[in-house]
Image (tube, rainbow, N blue to C red):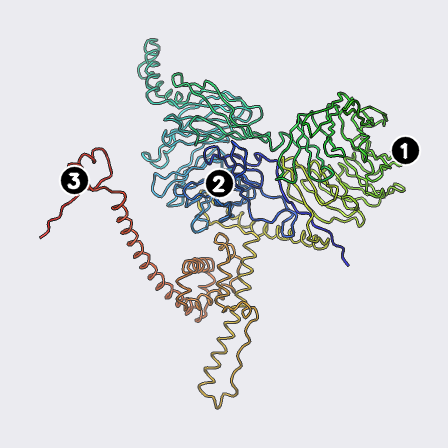
Amino acid sequence: MARSYKRFVQQSQFGVIAASSCAAPTYPLAQNVILKATGQQLHKQNIKTDEILQSYASQAPPPGSLDAANKEQPQVSTFIYNPQTQLIAVGYTDGKIILFDEMTGEEMMSFVGHSAGVSLLKFNLEGTILFSGGLDSKIISWDVVSEIGLGKYVGHKGAIVGLEYINSVGNGLLFTLAKDGVFKVWDLEIGQCVESKYVGFETFGFALELDLGVAVVLGGSTEIKVFDVDFVNRKEGDYLIEKCTIEKQSKQRGVLCEFLTNNNSQFLQVLSNDKTVELFRVRSNDELDKGLKKKQKRLTDAGELTDEEIAKNIQESRYSSIFQSIHLLRSTYKVKSSKWDTFAKNLSLIMATSANSIEYHTFNLDDKKKQVTSVDKKFDLQLKGHRTDIRTCDISHDGKLLSTASNGELKIWNLQNNNSCLRTFTTGYALCSKMLPGNTLVIVGTREGHLQLFDLVTSTMILEIENAHNGAIWCLDVSSDGRTIITGSQDKSLKFWKVEAAGGELELIHDTTVELGEDVLALKLSPSDNKFLAVSLLDNTVKIFFFDTMKFFLSLYGHKLPVLDLDISFDNKIIVTCSADKNVKIWGLDFGDCHRSIFAHNDSIMRVKFVPNTHRFFTSSKDKEIKYWDGDKFEMIQRLVAHNGEVWCLAVSEYGDKLVSCSHDHSIRIWEEIDDEVFVEEEKEKELEEQYEDNLLEQLEKPREEGNEEDEDGVTAVTKQTMESLKAGERLMSALDLGITEIENWDNYNEQMAKWNINKATSGPQPMKPSQNPILMAIRKTPEEYILETLLKIKSSQLEDALLAMSFSYTLRFLKFINRLLSNDIKLIQHLQILIRVLTFIIRNNYRELTSQRDPTLKLELQQVQLKLRQAIKGNINDLGFNLKGLRIASNEWNNMHNLSYLDEDEYETANKERLRARKRVFETTI
């Protein structure tokens, strides 16, 4: 009988303030309210109270659960909010787009069309069409109302870095810029590129201000290139004219730029690839004219240039004089993104840094000098996360507290109250830490060789031993009674410290030093009785000593690279070591024999932890994965894939029901043991199925991508096969198999009954009724209703991809189903739109096969379908026209009652001059 284990599932995630995966992780939503990206989730947060108001996450099962995929989870790459529809569009690193309701956080719809991450999103003015630009160099337009892809714009050769919708011309223009340095203007009415212009360099940022008629582009140098833009008065091909370049103060390349109108003045902020954001003010026309007149006078008085040369010089310097640098803001950390706060009265910036923090700066302007007089850092969100990678963590003995330490910070988290941060201490560069028995003291070892002891009750560092070692303290452990602390260091020594109370204060007294000849990388005391002390050295070996006498017991050798961590089981029978050689070795503590060597990960294995009172253990690695192992059967139980960076440290609770993991992505994840069982064979089958599905999707998409490579500056259909669409197509095909078979059986029966009724005497016995399908009997539906219900369950955005999965034989069956369904007038009126959409798509994609058929029955079916649909569409058009006319009449009556005021002739003339909305009162003559 196969052995089963309990499953570990992610219960919560915290520690990320602003995700590094998102190009612009912050977005102002209201006064003191922002949207921020935190890895796989999006949060609505009040930056004044640091309170999470709403969370937006996909409906995927939590990592580790039975239905969750064992692959890296997609992260938020970009997002945008539309106030008209109150929808938040979120793009992910796997190319998926999800739309959420801003108030409820509910997932409304999803789109899949990009083969790489989504880099930009933009709504039209009404919020009915969404444009997305991707790292795959494609731009896709999506109909939010119908939930379908309208078209994929192909032509760029690099990631999309600029995307703007222009509403002033016809059905609108799409203004795009890619990293290849090419501007493109797309006419949405004809679906063609009407203008292309090469900027001259690789581009990284872009901003457009239509009121000014100016576009600015950031490249790899310190220059900002300025273009004159006019989409109304110029013809196609002349929309963009290059004018000038301006220098910014930072020597690093530009990353992001954005315009803002504040108090009738316009500003431009430029973020560089360092710690600076430069602010420019846009000079008004009066200021420009005044300054240019002075310049013209100086040039005329100098007499070195002719009048024509002076006029040309003045014209060229007009654009270069538009932008005036007013301030250079320098942050403590490297700035990841910056965003104007459009809801603030004063000029304000929201900045997300690469150190996992959000800063809010307000600028005070001098109206006369037009300069920034002072800058106030109003908010600084950094409490709920670490600035750098978490290198060590530990859970208290009662499982209620968690300690995490990084370079400069030690944080204490409450695991029973929404994972809130209770304490923050200033430390050195922490490499190892441990919570002492009693859950009130934390000992930390630093890279500088210091030992620091923190008291959680008084929130102070009560003791620091400077230069406890002459090198970095890589590891430490505490005896079960809490009275002895062992530290291992880069200085090739072990040191034993006694914890003693003297005069009401705790002291660490150095007891013994053991020289080992090699750097000590990891150490572990046997947990139950402290019988053994295991130490890993830089020479790839592990030495085991008796703890009480420090007498040498065993030497374990076999790893090809240094052992980075080790752990001893509760019964002192086995020891597990993990190494930079990607292997885990399980050793017996009786004779030091290697029970099994397992190639466990695809990169260096950083941590290994036993589950208390068992021989099961966890390993974490730089390959971003955590694995759960059985140390007796030497097999993997479960893969826990959720982190998007190297997993540096692990901690297991005293009862073995909780696991904590910390990663390079700044996230802290809590995994809990649930009642669901894990069977090793099922997990292996699941992994093979996922590999097969990935290969299948690759094979399906590869020929389509190769075909699209030949397309130049055009619009193609939006299609991308996913497992959801493939499974939806399979469900539809199985429903057609079941339903059409049932329909044919009853058609045959009715035909036989008609013949039998004509001549009962000579036709033999009465035909038998066909037995009804048990599935249809159970759900009490007709075959037509069953197929229609299966069709309606397919998401609108996946419908075309699901229909592409059907072969031509199923197309014929589908036509037969539609012909039968059209006889039901009620169903036809209710689902006319989707039936026409499906029918036109099927006929368009199978046109050659259908025209090559010589079956008269098929021809008759198509003619019947055409006739019935035309009648239904004509009736639908009449109904729509009647309803629209009625709505216009109701709208006019509402305006007459609420929005219009009736005035006499003299009052009307006065109101008309004042541009009031009014209607002249007319007195009709009555007889």
In this picture, residue 142 sits left or right of residue 455:
left
**Mark 2 falls on what kind of element?**
strand
Choose mark 2 or mark 1, whichever is in front.
Answer: 1
Whole-percent x, y for residue 229 in the image: 37, 31
Q: CA distance from mark 2 to mark 1?
A: 64 Å
Residue 511 shows in this picture: yes
Whole-percent x, y for residue 536 in the image: 81, 33
Residue, disc 3? 904
How many residues crowd around disc 1 within 10 Å: few (fewer than 14), some, or many (20 or more)? few
* Front one among 304 and 861: 861
Q: Residue at x 34, y 17 (%)?
A: 292
Q: Amino acid at mark 2?
A: Gly
* Front one among 855 and 554: 554
Whole-percent x, y for residue 238 in the image: 36, 33
Q: CA distance from mark 3 to mark 2?
A: 56 Å
Residue 158 shows in this picture: no
How many residues crowd around disc 2 within 10 Å: few (fewer than 14), some, or many (20 or more)? many
Residue, disc 2? 133
In this picture, residue 565 sits left or right of residue 138:
right
In this picture, residue 818 sits left or right of residue 642:
left
Give residue 662's mark: none
Kindly indicate the quadrant of the structure image that contains residue 131.
top left
* Front one among 818 and 842: 818
Whole-percent x, y for residue 388 in the image: 64, 30
Residue, disc 1? 552
**Mark 3 falls on what kind of element?**
loop
Q: Amino acid at mark 1?
A: Phe
How many residues crowd around disc 3 within 10 Å: few (fewer than 14), some, or many (20 or more)? few
Kindly indicate the quadrant of the structure image that contains residue 414.
top right
